[in-house]
Structures are given as structure tokens and as C-alpha cells.
């Protein structure tokens, strides 16, 4: 097994953690008699040679023949983990750019392919499945791989292995040159669409869909029948999917090139299995996270799941209604009925159904959430996030999570009067800097409506630990906080940290612009004006006209955030729309095509502030309200609110420029 192992100069090769000199020992341990140690060694190799992907390292190319020898030896206890590593490397080699692919990989793979094909005949079904998966994801042509796969399918009597081989055939037949067996494979897969076994029919659709994207829509009933059938659990034993009902639902939904509302509606039909019902909600959420058009059709079905017997289904239904927010307000009464539902998910945070309902009502601006929110402000332990978090925007996938308490409060600005006593009580009694900072940020967001909090904030201004948090809140509240002028001016004149914040808050509560201008001049003297200073310059309006030349130069900055904030500050200081509007438009060019980046929201809002002079931007963005895909860069609930916010800003811009 180890012939040639010591002849490799492993110390000169690299893996994800540096030198590969530790690889030979790990390979030998994989073949050791202790199954636990062998498994640990195999997982270490998986981490070293693959980790999270992104490249194929030189150590992987050198290790490949030895990995396959391990996989071919029945006595090896970790054969499946080794095969998983081979599959990941073979797949990654087809996806990474050339500069991230070790030059030795392709020759090593070409030498290794015959050994992989031999594994299709292994006595163990799970090794045959793994081998089929490797052949499916690798880059070897159909000419080289189809004959072996066809022989395997003809001889195979294990149901799960047959599914893996069918999927591999669908992948291999598309890799050129496909060879003389290509037509035979397509005919075979077409025939399997009418097979007696539901999961074989499903596998055939998956295998053919890449070459026939219209097929899933044509065979919609076939797909729904298969994914909702009890036999769908067979996929849990496959290598290609390795999942039960929910995973198969997700993989099948991904076959549709656009928003297939009919598939989601079919999944949402009642089903005796909890996994099927919760999976259906997950697929509906993934669809709605990506597209707007299915909302009206899916909303009643989602609301119906608020009465589901399964805690996870009720939670997901309420959380998804929270994401839809105002659009789902007609179902607020049904949501409110769940406020006392303390059934908890099995997640680490143990979020409850009642908490999801509270969040949904907050997003709907429904006052029935206020008692529960006030309890949370008072410090009641909950499943809400401890801090703000973002999740990636993944196609067809939704992260069902709760926000942080400050984020919930941010949607309740219409109910400040009822919430302020609890917030002020926390400001007066808490010694936790993070708690005070979070609530001060909420007050800043509430703005002048939070003026009743000024006495509590004045007390915090006397405290060296908390004054900067209080200053932020007072700046947001504005002139109603003018009782803090002297304290803020003193902080602004003493220098040190947060001087800029103190000078800005002093101006916002009604003070003179001089201290802030001095701070901004010092910042500008250091070179390019930092983004936080640019925002403060915009607040100064015409008082910042002395910075016009610097701001005008920054409107061509390579960084979009600096460019946007500089253009806004220039317009606020001078009224120069001829420079500001084109600069802001450069940040929103992609929005007109359906792309979204966070910098676009302030850019559109600044353009709306400019008004009719921003008509060229309105003409550029006139079709944005018609875009069906959600405009988002984040996943989870934030992706929905990003879409709402940018569309609201565009609507305002269009209305002002009519």
C-alpha cells in the first residue's frame, strides 16, 4: 500500500495549514487497527487537504494514489471518509480557477481514474455509491466513464446505489467527448422517467434536468409524488444527496430555473410526516427569500401552518410571516394567538414559537407585541440574538433566525411612548456597557420621538464610561437634548477619544458648528476624509462649504462608500447637483440590472433628498419596482428588509422626480 510514499518530498508540498510533512503519518494511521484513531486521522486529512475548498493543494495531488489504495482495502476502517475526501477534491478541481489548481492534480487524476472505476464493483454497496458519486463530480469525459457506469447500473441490485449511478450517468454524459454510449444513456434515462419506483423516476429527472431545463416543470406531478412519498428516505443512504425528505425537497426545488410556485404549493399540502411539513415551509421560505411574485399564493398556506402540531413548523411559519412583515399583516390575529406558545426549538438558543410570533407582530407594527417586548427590555432571558448578525444570501435557502432586541425595537418607532419607560429604566439601572450602548443606539434611531429619555441620557453624560453612548442618542434626538450642550462642548474641547462624536452631538442638539468644523479640519488634514467624518460634514450643510474642493475630488474615489458619502456631503454643503448626481448614480448602476449592494440604499436616499435634479437617476431606476427577484445581499430576515428598504427608497425617488 505504501510503495512510493517515502519517496515523495512531503516537506516541500503544501496543504491548508502549511507544510505537508505530517501527511504520511496520517495516511498510515488511516490503515491502523484502531477504528477511532483511523477515523480521526481521516478527518484530519479532510481538513488539511480540503478544509473549506477554494483550491486544490499540491499535497492533495501527491496523496491521491494513497487515498485510493486506502479506499480499495476492505480492512481500512475509514474508507467512507477517505472517499468523501476524494469526491470533494475531484469536484473542487472542476470549479476552481486555474491558478488555484495544483498543476500535478490533473495528471494524478488521470492515473487514478481506473482505480476509481474499479471501486464501482466493490462488494460493499456504500463504497459503490461513493465511487459513483466521485465519477459523477469528477472532470473525466463521458467516453472514459460511461461504459463502467452502464455496466454498474445493469448489474446493481442495491436500490440506493442505483440512484447514485443514475445521477452519475446524468453528469458524465454531459462531459465531452461523451463517446459512443451517449445516445444510449439519454435513452435509458428517458425510459427511467416511467420506472415503477418513485425515487428512480425522481433520479431520472435530476439526471436529465441539466440538459433539459424544462423537464422539471413538465414532470411536476412526478416530482411532488416522489419527494412526498415515504420511500424518499432511501436518499438518506445515497452518497450524492445523503439526506432525507427535507434535503431532497431542497435539491429538487433547485432544478427549477425560476420561481416555481406550484412546486412549493404542492409541498405545503398536508402530510403526516413532520419532516415533510417543516421541509415544505423551508422550501417556501427559500423561494420567497429569492422571489417576490409567489407571496400572494403562498401566504395563506404559510399562515395555515401556525396551527401545526409540530413546534418547528409553527416557529418557521411565524418567522416567515415576520420576514414578510407588512405584507402579512392580515394574519396578525392568528400570529397573536401564539404569543403564549412556549414550545422551544431544538436549536442551541432554544427559540420559542411565542418569540417568533412576537417578532412577526413587531414587523407588522402591531401593538399586541408591546407587553412581550417590554419584558425583553427588562432583561427577560430569551432566544433573541444577543447581537446583530448577518447571514449569506444563498439561492433557494433561508436562515430561520430571530434578530437582536435592538433590531426588534427599531421597527416599533410608532410605539415609543409605551416603550420608553422600560428603556429609561435600563439606562438608569444597568451597569453593562453593551446593554447601555445598544439601548442608546435604539434611542438614536427613534429620533425626536424619544425626547422623554433626555433626563436619563444627561445622567449618563456625567459618567466617563457611558457618555459617548449617551451622546450618540442625544444627537439622534436632536434639539430636545439641548440641555446637554455644555457637557458635550466640554467633551468636544478636551480632545482624546470620541471628540468627533461630542462635537457632532453638540451641533445636532443645537450648538454652534465651530467645534465640529475644527474636528473635521483635523481629520481632513490627515489626507482622505474618513467616511464617518463625511457623514458629519453632510449634517453641517452650508457650514461645510470650505471642504468643497476636497469633497469634489473624493466623488471620483475608487471606494463606493467614500464616493457616495462625499457626493452627499458636497451637495449638502454647496447644492452642486452636477457633480453629486452622476457620482451617486455610479453606485446604483447595478441596481437597474437587479443587483444589490448595501451602499445602494444610502445612494438612492441621497438622490431622493436632492429631488427633481436627480431625474436622470430616476430614469435609470424606473424599472426597479417591476423586478421580481429580491434586491438583497444578506440572507435571513435581513434580506427581506433590504428588499423593502431599497424599493421604498426608489419609489420615493421616482415620486419626487415625476
Image (spheres, rainbow, N blue to C red):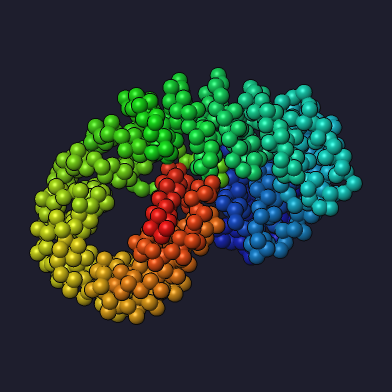
Q: Nearer the viewer, residue 197 or 53?
A: 197
- Where in the figure is residue 344, as x and y percent of width and height? 39, 28
- In this rendering, position of residue 282 left or right of residue 540: right
Residue at 56% x, 45% y is: 395
Q: How many marks can you see? A: 0
- Single out the residue that lies furthest toward the right: 180
Residue at 55% x, 19% y is: 272
> Is any atom of residue 129 visible in this view?
no
Residue 364 figure quarter: top left
Q: Nearer the viewer, residue 424 or 465?
A: 424
Q: In the picture shown, does residue 431 fall above or below 491?
A: above
- Where in the figure is residue 595, as x and y percent of width and height? 52, 56
Point out the image quarter for the C terminus: bottom left
Q: Nearer the viewer, residue 100 or 190?
A: 190
Residue 492 figure quarter: bottom left
Q: In the picture shown, does residue 288 fall above or below 448?
A: above
- Where in the figure is residue 38, as x and y percent of width and height? 61, 41
- Where in the figure is residue 651, as x and y percent of width and height? 42, 52
> Is any atom of residue 492 visible in this view?
yes
Residue at 24% x, 69% y is: 540
Residue at 65% x, 65% y is: 99
- In this rendering, position of residue 575 left or right of residue 639: left
Amino acid at each position: 500500500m505504501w510503495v512510493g510514499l517515502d519517496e515523495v518530498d512531503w516537506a516541500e508540498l503544501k496543504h491548508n495549514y502549511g507544510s505537508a510533512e505530517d501527511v504520511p503519518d496520517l495516511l498510515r494511521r488511516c490503515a491502523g487497527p484502531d477504528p477511532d484513531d483511523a477515523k480521526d486521522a481521516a478527518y484530519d486529512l479532510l481538513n488539511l487537504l480540503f478544509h473549506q475548498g477554494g483550491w486544490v493543494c499540491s499535497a492533495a495531488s501527491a496523496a491521491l494514489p494513497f487515498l485510493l489504495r486506502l479506499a480499495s482495502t476492505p480492512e481500512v476502517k475509514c474508507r467512507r471518509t477517505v472517499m468523501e475526501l476524494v469526491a470533494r477534491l475531484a469536484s473542487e478541481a472542476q470549479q476552481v480557477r486555474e491558478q488555484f489548481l495544483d498543476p500535478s492534480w490533473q495528471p494524478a487524476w488521470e492515473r487514478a481514474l481506473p482505480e476509481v472505476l474499479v471501486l464501482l464493483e466493490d462488494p460493499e454497496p456504500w463504497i459503490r455509491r461513493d465511487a459513483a458519486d466521485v465519477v459523477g463530480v469528477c472532470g473525466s469525459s463521458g467516453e472514459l466513464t460511461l461504459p463502467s457506469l452502464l455496466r454498474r447500473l445493469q448489474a446493481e441490485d442495491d436500490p440506493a446505489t442505483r440512484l447514485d449511478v443514475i445521477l452519475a450517468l446524468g453528469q458524465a454524459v454531459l462531459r465531452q467527448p461523451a463517446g459512443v454510449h451517449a445516445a444510449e444513456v439519454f435513452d435509458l434515462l428517458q425510459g427511467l422517467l416511467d420506472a415503477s419506483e418513485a425515487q428512480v423516476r425522481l433520479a431520472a429527472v435530476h439526471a436529465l434536468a441539466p440538459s433539459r431545463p424544462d423537464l422539471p416543470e413538465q414532470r411536476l406531478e412526478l416530482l411532488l409524488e416522489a419527494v412526498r412519498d415515504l420511500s424518499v428516505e432511501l436518499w438518506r443512504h445515497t452518497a450524492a444527496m445523503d439526506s432525507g425528505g427535507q434535503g431532497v425537497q431542497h435539491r429538487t426545488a433547485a432544478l427549477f430555473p425560476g420561481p416555481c410556485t406550484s412546486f412549493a404549493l404542492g409541498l405545503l399540502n398536508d402530510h403526516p410526516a413532520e419532516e415533510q411539513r417543516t421541509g415544505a415551509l423551508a422550501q417556501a421560505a427559500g423561494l420567497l427569500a429569492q422571489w417576490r411574485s409567489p407571496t400572494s399564493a403562498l401566504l395563506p398556506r404559510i399562515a395555515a401552518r401556525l396551527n401545526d402540531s409540530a413546534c418547528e413548523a409553527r416557529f418557521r411559519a411565524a418567522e416567515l410571516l415576520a420576514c414578510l412583515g407588512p405584507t402579512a399583516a392580515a394574519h396578525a390575529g392568528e400570529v397573536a394567538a401564539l404569543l403564549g406558545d412556549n414550545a422551544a426549538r431544538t436549536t442551541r438558543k432554544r427559540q420559542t414559537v411565542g418569540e417568533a410570533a412576537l417578532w412577526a407582530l413587531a414587523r407588522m407594527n402591531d401593538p399586541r407585541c408591546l407587553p412581550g417586548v417590554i419584558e425583553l427590555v427588562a432583561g427577560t432571558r430569551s432566544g433573541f440574538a444577543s447581537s446583530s448578525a448577518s447571514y449569506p444570501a444563498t439561492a433557494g435557502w433561508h436562515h430561520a433566525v430571530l434578530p437582536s432586541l435592538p433590531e426588534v425595537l427599531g421597527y416599533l418607532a410608532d410605539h415609543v411612548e409605551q416603550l420608553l419607560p422600560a428603556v429609561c429604566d435600563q439606562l438608569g439601572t444597568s451597569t453593562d456597557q453593551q446593554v447601555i450602548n445598544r439601548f442608546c443606539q435604539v434611542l438614536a434611531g427613534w429620533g425626536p420621538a424619544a425626547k422623554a429619555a433626555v433626563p436619563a441620557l444627561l445622567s449618563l453624560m456625567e459618567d466617563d464610561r457611558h457618555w459617548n453612548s449617551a451622546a450618540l442618542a442625544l444627537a439622534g434626538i436632536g434639539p430636545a437634548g439641548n440641555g446637554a450642550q455644555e457637557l458635550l462642548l466640554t467633551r468636544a474641547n478636551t480632545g482624546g477619544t470620541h471628540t468627533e462624536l461630542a462635537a457632532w452631538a453638540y451641533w445636532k442638539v443645537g450648538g454652534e458648528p465651530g467645534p465640529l468644523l475644527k474636528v473635521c479640519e483635523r481629520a481632513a488634514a490627515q489626507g482622505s476624509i474618513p467616511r464617518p467624518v463625511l457623514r458629519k460634514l453632510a449634517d453641517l450643510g452650508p457650514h461645510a462649504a470650505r471642504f468643497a474642493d476636497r469633497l469634489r475630488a473624493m466623488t471620483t474615489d475608487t471606494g463606493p462608500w467614500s464616493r457616495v458619502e462625499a457626493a452627499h456631503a458636497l451637495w449638502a454643503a454647496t447644492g452642486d447637483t452636477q457633480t453629486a448626481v452622476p457620482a451617486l448614480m455610479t453606485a446604483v448602476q447595478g441596481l437597474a440590472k437587479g443587483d444589490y449592494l448595501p451602499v445602494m440604499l444610502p445612494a438612492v436616499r441621497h438622490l431622493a433628498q436632492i429631488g427633481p435634479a436627480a431625474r436622470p437617476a430616476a430614469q435609470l431606476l424606473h424599472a426597479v419596482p417591476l423586478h421580481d427577484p429580491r434586491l438583497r445581499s444578506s440572507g435571513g430576515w435581513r434580506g427581506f428588509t433590504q428588499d423593502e428598504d431599497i424599493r421604498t427608497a426608489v419609489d420615493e425617488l421616482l415620486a419626487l422626480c415625476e
